[in-house]
Amino acid sequence: MIEHFSLDGKRIPFQPGQTIMDAAMQAGEYIPHLCHNPEFRPRGSCRLCVVRANGRSVAACTSPAREGLEVESDTPDIQADRRSLLQMLFVEGNHLCPACEKSGNCQLQAVAYYCGMLAPDFTHLYPVRELDGSHPDFVLDFNRCILCELCVRASRDADAKGVFGISGRGIGAHLIVNAPSGKLGDTDFDPHDRAAQVCPVGAILPKHKGYDVPIGRRIYDRKPVSLVGDVADHQEDMS
Amino acid sequence: MSAPSPEQAAGTQLERWGSDSDNLLQMLIGVQAALGHIPEAAIRRFEAALGVGRARIEGLIGFYAFLHHRPRGRFDIRVADNIIERMRGSRELAEALAGRLGCPPGETRVDGRLSLGYTPCIGMSDQAPALLVNGYAIPAVEHARLEQVVALVEANTPLADWPPELFEVALNIQRKDLLLEAAVEDGAALAALKASGADALMQVLEASGLRGRGGAGFGLARKWGFCRQAPAEAKRRVVVCNADEGEPGTFKDRVLMQDPQQAARMFEGMTLCAGMVGADSGFLYLRGEYRNLLEPLERELQRRRDAGLLGKNIAGIAGFDFDIAIHLGAGAYICGEESALIESLEGKRGNPRDRPPFPVTRGYLGRPTVVNNVETFIAAALVAVQGADWHRARGTEHSAGTKILSVSGDCARPGIYEYPFGVTLQQILDDCGAADTQAVQIAGAAGRTIPPDEFQRRVAFEDLGTAGSFMIFDQSRDLLEMVRNFNDFFVHESCGFCTPCRVGTTLMQKTLAKVSRGHAAPMDLDTLRRIGELMRRTSHCGLGATAPLSVLDTLDKFPALYRDRLSDRGFVPGFDLDAALSEARAASGRDDPRAHLEGDGV
Ligand SMILES: Cc1cc2nc3c(=O)[nH]c(=O)nc-3n(C[C@H](O)[C@H](O)[C@H](O)COP(=O)(O)O)c2cc1C
Ligand code: SF4
Ligand code: SF4
């Protein structure tokens, strides 16, 4: 027997074991998210997918769907919370969209447009972060990392390489590379790795093809993220 | 005696803990203690021996505040810096140490003799100011003691040869009730288990109304019942005692564990739990700040094994096998949250897990796990012997029994107070000799700020729940300093997993600093509220959800704190132009008044 819950009044079918996010995605309903990708174990850390389920705030990507659950997602107050979270991600790093190669192919930017975030509002933290250009095919720009851990999960679970990890804590949490030098060039990271294709922002960038697809013809330039979906599903459009 | 080589130090740990990467954190703590840091060669040894990636090891060193890549001084001194310690001169103490020893806070002296720094509350608020030397606590560091510490460091006297009285910690028990007065023999709870059986005792616990004492107040019988029913291979369930006691202002678990009789009861409560739910392994997760309790507690465990109260066929019950290991924490408040604690037990970074599944169904290594507080296990051991009515004789309908409070701050008699649930704040204030009280901070930095017109409120789960922290502030105090101190604490302790807490705590810190400087506009207060409410709604765990409470409470109940400091201008940019000029000042070697913008901006 198929069970159902409601998402903003729409009836969404689900199978036992699915999360609210799984079922919504399957039904073609969009709930904003950054750290989620159905290929990997959900993490629930960006908090963008927080919805109200029977009155309680929960992350859609980690909360099991239940029969009869009433889920609210696209309401003015929840969208306002999402804008605040996005603003936090923008001021936490150094995101200079006009100068970023990923502009137009960036999911952070696309979700911000979708949620109607116009300005960062909060005080910029301007962290000092380094660039790692040691790999022949990729640049790591830590300035834009939003700690979604998609690369960590992809490299560990899909590529069986474990190239990435997280160190530090709190506002000092940061991505690290699993090599004594800490450099990507000293790992077996490879362009065919799934981890090379999942970064939602411009933190893991392929070299030599920055503007092969001109701005204006990029993934999110013409259609919103709610219709286009995740960056990770559009690798062919980026190269 | 010369220090071991990094390989030797790592080897010793591998021998002690086995080649199980679940114990990696304990091994790193051991190397840090032996060498004062975790050198490259030790990391390589662990990588090879345990088959773990280097990123995992680095991730741990980066997460736990007491682990370091770079060498610390031979004497690693950390001055406790919670607001209560500050009120008792922690900053002056650190400055004095810095001056006398020639080592500013935050640094290591060039000869490697010492490192000096600050650390959050170390569970000594009733005998502040206090500090840790290589993890060992020295309370009440006033003039004479300060001189003594300075002399010992300068003489390079090995810590083991420092006078033992420096490390003596007073119990300061001021009021006893049910728990602290009970006279029950060692082993009595296990005898009751043998006599009545688990089912009958479960009913006693249920009838007693006993709820967890670590803060949330979850029903004990329900928790143990869930675990007992959770499917598990044979009796492979797990019992964990949460002795992380990281909440600023609490120290009651420290006092309980210091008292041999109570420590014995705590272990007995854990063993009772194991017998009732069907568990074969137990852990005491002891915060690193309580390092001085490790050996006495290990001795008590050995005594219990020798007495047949741990090990095989415990208390003569055939097939009842259970033992307890002590794991140390390493400077991470979040590891008091039960699922982060379990991650830490597994040798990982202390990021809280998703719940569900709850630890009672999937905990340590996926096995059903009970996590309870020190005081809860003691209460359970007593209830098993004394019965439900004994427990119900105190407290309220929804909060049966008593609560042990850690009272500190502006009062004549700080210390431990055991009260029946339902006691009013005013009663506690009267008993401990507090006068002219401006506010009570109940339940720690994560708790509520209570103004005098609410002092008739009660300590009870149905009114003000608390794990026991009770900090008192009189009229002479600036509560904004309290709020900022708590916020700094959360900036330091956020695990960094989720966006609202990781970024929100820091944004609040900046905004509070702006308020304090007199640069804030009304808009900034709206920002504080907006961030705080966002954190409450969207954080992944209780840390982020409670971190903004003192800000939100003071905005509501002490609005003058903020209002009186507002700038008279409608908007002040968050960007601090004067601070931005500091690089230019450094480059030009100038710091005269004309190289600064005026205090009130451009
Ligand atoms: C951030 C955070 C820190 C916590 N710290 C502690 C602690 O130090 N000691 C404790 O017993 N419980 C702590 N808790 C509560 C535990 O998660 C858990 O509820 C408790 O150990 C259960 O034991 P009890 O039912 O006996 O209270 C903390 C919770 C959070 C969210
Ligand atoms: S590098 Fe990209 S994929 Fe990896 S954690 Fe950062 S933002 Fe996520
Ligand atoms: S709320 Fe804070 S402590 Fe809890 S998971 Fe999020 S970042 Fe970590």
Image (cartoon, coloured by chain):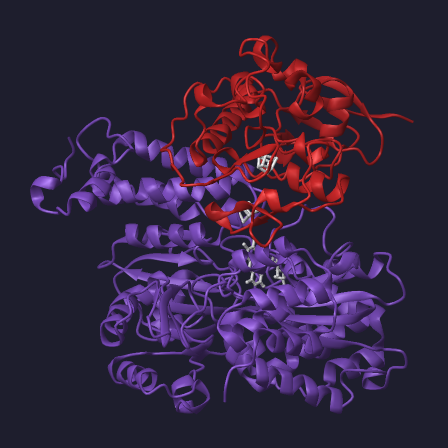
Is residue A139 placed above or below A31 in the rendered structure? below
Instruction: Name the one closer to the observer, B423 or B312.
Output: B312
On screen, residue A53 versus residue B601, left or right, reads right
Residue B101 position (above or below residue B66): below
Colour red belongs to chain? A
Residue shown at 42% from the left, 62% from the top: B120
Hey, which residue is sitting farthest front in the picture? A136
* Residue nearest the observer in this picture, A138 or A77: A138
Determine which quarter of the picture holds residue B599. top left
In this rendering, would B398 be left or right of B451?
right
In terms of depth relative to the viewer, which is nearer, A18 or A53? A18
Q: Is residue A49 above or below residue A178?
A: above
Rendered colour, chain B: purple
Instruction: Name the quarter where the C terminus of chain B is drawn.
Output: top left
Residue A63 in percent (x, y) is at 71, 37
On the question of residue B243 being in view, the answer is no
In the image, taking residue B380 as reference, residue B424 lies left or right, namely left
- Count of numbered marks: 0
Residue A151, position as x, y percentages in the image: 65, 38
Residue for point 86% across, 67% down = B235
Using the rendered view, name the quadrant where residue B366 is placed: bottom right
Q: Nearer the viewer, residue B297 or A232?
A: A232
Q: Is residue A76 left or right of residue B16?
A: left
Horizontal and vertical percent for residue B226? 78, 57
Residue at point 66%, 33% (across, down): A196
Ligand 1 found in image quarter: bottom right
Which image quadrant is residue B60 in?
Answer: bottom right
The image position of residue B311, as x and y in percent, is 79, 82
